[in-house]
Image (spheres, rainbow, N blue to C red):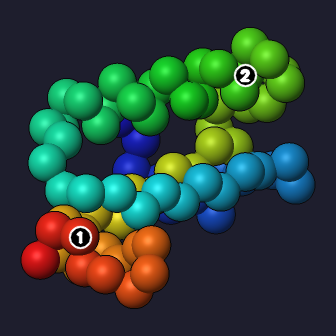
Amino acid sequence: MSRALPCDVLSKDCVFIQLMLNAGRTVDQKRAFYKAIADGLHERLRLRREDVVINMVEVSKENWSYRNGKARYA
């Protein structure tokens, strides 16, 4: 596995993806997700896999508020 920082390998075509989601996925699930996204973007758009940067922001369910300002899970 490369330890290079993203800025060392990114081209002008790079894509940054950030997701905010409930905590609870395993490391293996995350790895599979990252790979599926990079592979899909490569296959459909010919984007280099090295140009896909994905960040997951996991939060607890009680930190969500939607629909009329209610904390649905708190």
Question: Which residue appears at 47% of the width and 57% of the height?
Answer: 19
List x then y, in percent, for residue 22.
Answer: 25, 57
Q: Residue furthest bottom?
A: 69
Residue 11, position as x, y percentages in the image: 81, 50
Residue corresponding to mark 1: 72
Is disc 2 surrounded by few (<14), some (14 to 19) or many (20+) residues within 10 Å? some
Give the mark nearer the N terminus: 2 vs 1: 2
Q: Amino acid at mark 1?
A: Arg
Q: Position of residue 66 (x, y in %)?
A: 42, 74
Q: Locate the N terminus by quadrant.
A: top left
Q: Is residue 70 above or below residue 50?
A: below
Between 9 and 48, the residue placed more toward the observer is 48
The residue drawn where x is 66% and y is 50% is 9
Name the residue at 79% across, 30% down: 47
Circle 2 is placed at which residue position? 42
Q: Residue at x 35, y 65 (%)?
A: 57
Report the Cα–Cα distance between label 2 and label 1: 37 Å
